[in-house]
């Protein structure tokens, strides 16, 4: 079975000849598609607060800058680094670590007593997945990001190239967007809304206009 690297499955459609020829207007404007990611609601709110801080501190933040635009910028920056050259094994480690940290199931370690003989016992640790009651689950936020179809396809191709280093795990563009965003939010949590981070984002915004 062929892997799908996003909900849009652009790479497989291309390989199977299922995509349609683009019109001149599509090439001129760039065909745009939407992808949706899911995050814990706190991480969504933390991003919204960062956006508000950007507007409060900087007078030249373009109107329309929001969380979806921020995530798109993080993704474009990731693609730029890939185009400049990257070591696939290192990127794979980053993504696998990010998937385990941000997208993995929550587990707990529990020590249980195991009989070795009739009179000798030992303890061993086992991992158990935490099954939360519906009422206790944290509220989720859904963020929809629009980008050029060519940007999504470029990411799918890169993930396909990366697959030999991903330990048989499948990572999608949606996973990648989520990892990039939550890694950014984690940096904000640890370092605060530093002037360096805001200026870097602002510089990317201006160059994108």
Image (cartoon, rainbow, N blue to C red):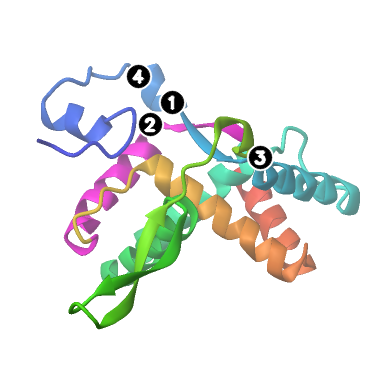
Q: Is residue 86 magenta?
A: no
In the visual, does 114 lie left or right of 50?
left
User: Could you tell me residue 119's position as x and y percent?
Assistant: 24, 81
- For the residues labelled 4 and 2, the Cα–Cα distance comes to 15 Å
Task: State which tag comes first along the sequence, 1 or 3.
Answer: 1
Front tag of 4 and 3:
3
Q: Earlier in the sequence, mark 1 or mark 2?
A: 1
Res 135 quadrant in image = top right
Please determine whether, in this image, residue 184 is positioned above or below residue 196: above
**Mark 2 or 3, nearer chain start:** 3
- Mark 4 vs mark 1: give the one in front: 1
Residue 24: image tag: 4
Q: What secondary structure do most residues of the magenta stretch adopt? A: helix
**Real-space CA distance between mark 4 and mark 1, rounded to the nearest whole angstrom:** 17 Å
Q: Nearer the viewer, residue 164 or 11?
A: 164
What residue lies at 62% left-to-right and 37% top-to-bottom? 136
* Quadrant placement of the N terminus: top left
127 and 37: which one is in front? 127
- Cβ–Cβ below 8 Å for labels 4 and 1? no
Does the CB distance between marks 1 and 3 fall below 8 Å?
no
Earlier-in-chain disc, 4 versus 2: 4
Q: Which mark is residue 41?
A: 3
Q: Which residue is mark 2?
A: 149
């Amino acid at each position: 079975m062929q892997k799908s690297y996003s909900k849009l499955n652009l790479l497989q459609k291309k390989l199977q000849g299922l995509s349609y020829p683009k019109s001149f207007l599509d090439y001129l404007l760039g065909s745009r598609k939407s992808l949706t990611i899911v995050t814990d609601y706190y991480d969504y709110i933390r991003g919204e607060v960062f956006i508000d801080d950007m507007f409060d501190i900087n007078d030249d933040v373009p109107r329309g800058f929001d969380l979806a635009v921020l995530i798109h910028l993080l993704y474009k920056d990731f693609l730029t680094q890939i185009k400049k050259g990257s070591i696939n094994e290192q990127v794979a480690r980053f993504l696998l670590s990010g998937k385990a940290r941000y997208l993995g199931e929550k587990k707990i370690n529990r020590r249980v007593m195991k009989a070795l003989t009739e009179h000798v016992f030992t303890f061993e640790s086992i991992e158990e997945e935490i099954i939360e009651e519906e009422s206790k689950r944290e509220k989720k936020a859904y963020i929809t990001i629009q980008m050029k179809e060519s940007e999504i396809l470029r990411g799918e191709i890169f993930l396909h190239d990366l697959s030999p280093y991903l330990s048989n795990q499948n990572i999608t563009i949606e996973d990648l967007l989520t990892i990039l965003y939550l890694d950014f939010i984690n940096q904000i949590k640890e370092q605060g809304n530093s002037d360096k981070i805001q200026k870097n984002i602002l510089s990317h915004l201006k160059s994108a206009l």
